[in-house]
Structures are given as C-alpha cells and as structure tokens.
Amino acid sequence: MQLSDFDFDLPDHLIATRPAKPRTSAKLLVATSSEITDARVHDITRFFRPGDRLVLNDTKVIPARLTGYRHRDSAQGPVKAKIEVTLLEPKGEGQWGALIKPLKKIQEGEVIHFSGDFSAILESKEDGQAILRFDADGDAFEAALQASGAMPLPPYIAAKRTADEQDKTDYQTVFARHSGAVAAPTASLHFDEDLLQKLSDMGVEFSHVTLHVGAGTFLPVKVDDVTTHKMHAEWGRVSEAAAAEIAETKSKGGRVIPVGTTALRLIESAARDGVIQPWEGETDIFIYPGFEFQVTDALMTNFHLPKSTLMMLVSALMGQGRVREIYAHAIENNYRFFSYGDSSLLLPK
C-alpha cells in the first residue's frame, strides 16, 4: 500500500478560505457503495432515520497563535525581537508545548511579553519545539488567550490569508465545550442549533465525546509504505454515559455515525476489544484500508488533503476505488475542500 495510492490532483481554487454562510448551506455529497447524491447540509434530515446516533466531538479550539516580544539590554540600549508562538498541547501547571519563530532569537529563561500583563517564560527547547510556562492558568489563561490570540488556521488557509476576528466564530463548533484543541473538528462546523433541533425532533440522538485535535493532524506522511507511518497522539475521552449510549444504539440496530474523523478515531480507540467502553488517554490509532471498524456505521466528513492519513481513513471505510470515484465527482462538481469546505456523508452499507 503506497502513499501514491492516496494522491489526486486538486485545483487550487477549490480550497476554501472562508466557510459557507449560513453554515448549513454548504454542499453535501451523500455517497453509498453505488450511488452519489448532491445535496446541501440543511437537507441532511433526508438521509437519517429515527434511532440513528450522531457522535459529536465537543472540543473547543483555543486562539493558539500569539505574537509577542523578547526584550534585552545591549551595549546600544534596550532591544526587542518579535516572537511568533503557536501553542501545540498543554503540559500541565501552566506549561505548554509550542512552536516558536524564530526559535534562535530567544534563550531559555527569557520572557516573551504578549498584550497587557500576559507573558510566558521559555523553560526549554527540544527537537525544534519549546516548553513555555505562562503567568496565567485556568480561566485567567483562557481569557488572556481570547484577548491576545488568533485562531490557528490550517496551513493551507494561513498561506492565503491571516486569521481575523471572524475566525473565532467560524472556526468553532456551536457545541464546543472543553478547551484544548489547536485545530477544529471541521465536519462539525456545518451544524447550527436549528439543524441540531430538527434532527432531534425526528428521533436522531446525540452523544458527545472529546478529542483535543492537535497540530499533528496536518503533518504530512513521509513514508512510501503507508503501513509504516507513525501517527501523532491526541488526548481524548469517551465518558461512561457516551459509551453506554453508543452501545445501546448498536444493540437496538441503530446506526452510529461520527461527525468527523476525530470522533471516529476516538470511538474506535474505545472499542478495540469489540465493544465500546469508557475510555480516556492519548490515542495514536491509525486507520487505513484493512482496518476493522467496531462501532462506526457511517461518517460525515469534509474533503481531505491528497496523501493524508484522513484520505486513508475514508478509504478504509468506503474502499479505495470508491473514494477515488467520490473525489472525482466532488472535483468535477466544484465542491470546496478542506477545513472551511463542503461536506460528505459516507454510507458504506
């Protein structure tokens, strides 16, 4: 199984830099093993039935991009250097793993000053990353981030434009609860409260799980033999209540449909023994063709990067040949791709 098996040509103009407005007006490609239907997200009630369970990732994206300054005294007087910080993952007790640009301009023990009294000290450098300790924690830290930070837009959007205040709304789901992600569970961005209520009214049920999406989700696959790729790890939790709800739906013959690859990876991590169980920890589960799904019956997801682990995941669910047909249809019909793009509902059975 080669990396080239998951490649395709994507016209640059199909990379979305802003979401559809309203959220539910995005295109929706509904694919079974033999048919493709073009619809809109607000039509999704046509494709669900009472007893279906949607699994939603309720992680909350933090404004993880910060701009600050490092100050020093020199023979010529006080000098400062601009420092760009991208938070990657919490380490506890006010510490965060981070990327710093330029890393060489700051030394261990120096302080980066952001807006107001918000600052962090560089505690260590390792493997091109940094450990920062902030002077705020908990609610104070979150408030300072909201005031000073920008949303960590994916590299394929950031290359085209800078993040702005609108992204703090656009790049967040309406059911975000638990802070910690540095990338959004983007399939969920298509839902608004009205659509969720319509689904509930027709008998579709919901379970919430939490997986803090990390920057590693954008890391390229660098090996030709994809089976040797090492996945990044992300922290997640499936509560006792969520596990029980999903198990009950399976026992009653309902469909379990994760919204997004993050929710899918998490519930499959919690069901490796064949039955879903409460689960908490770091998962580096890698799903590629040949994977045996334990609880997932279908998937709602956006359109993914060529040669990415997410292309491998959807190929595991639908089959490599079928995914090539689905993506060819999407490109031919001008579906918008990636985080702010359109959506698909994949129904393998």
Image: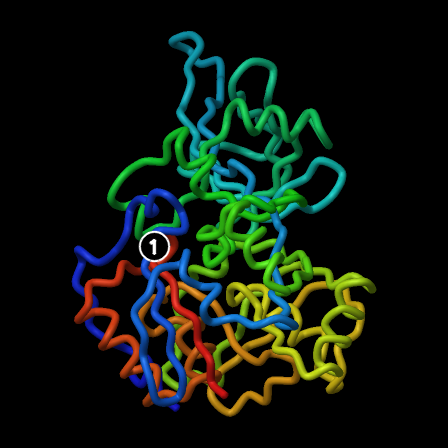
Q: Residue at x 34, y 46 (%)?
A: 19
Where 220 sits versus 165, above or below? below
Mark 1 crowd level (few <14, some 14–19, many ≥20, 10 Å Cα): many
Q: Residue at x 48, y 13 (%)?
A: 73
Residue highlighted by disc 1: 26
Give the left or right position of residue 260, taking residue 295 as reference: left
Measuring from the top left, give residue 25's x and y in whole percent. Answer: 35, 51
Residue 183 visible somewhere in the drawing: no
Which corner quadrant of the image does residue 323 belong to?
bottom left
The tally of labels here is 1
Give the left or right position of residue 244, taking residue 127 as reference: right
Where 30 sits versus 122, above or below? below
Residue 143 visible somewhere in the drawing: yes
State the scheme by which the image is colored: rainbow
Measuring from the top left, give residue 312's x and y in whole percent. Answer: 43, 79
Residue that lies at the very extreme toward the front in this rendered image? 202
Q: Give 253 or 324, whichever is nearer the viewer.
A: 253
Give the left or right position of residue 61, taking residue 303 as reference: right
Which corner quadrant of the image does residue 250 belong to?
bottom right
Which corner quadrant of the image does residue 324 belong to?
bottom left
Look at the image and tell me in which quarter the N terminus lies: bottom left
Residue that lies at the very extreme toward the right in this rendered image? 240
Q: Give 192 or 69, whichever is nearer the viewer.
A: 192
Measuring from the top left, give residue 288's x and y in whole percent. Answer: 48, 83
Q: Give 29 or 238, whichever is nearer the viewer.
A: 29
- Residue type at mark 1? Ala
Instruction: Identify the secondary structure beneath mark 1.
Output: loop
Q: Residue at x 23, y 75 (%)?
A: 329
Q: Give 126 or 293, whichever is nearer the viewer.
A: 293
Measuring from the top left, give residue 90's x and y in whole percent. Answer: 66, 45
Q: Residue at x 47, y 35 (%)?
A: 168
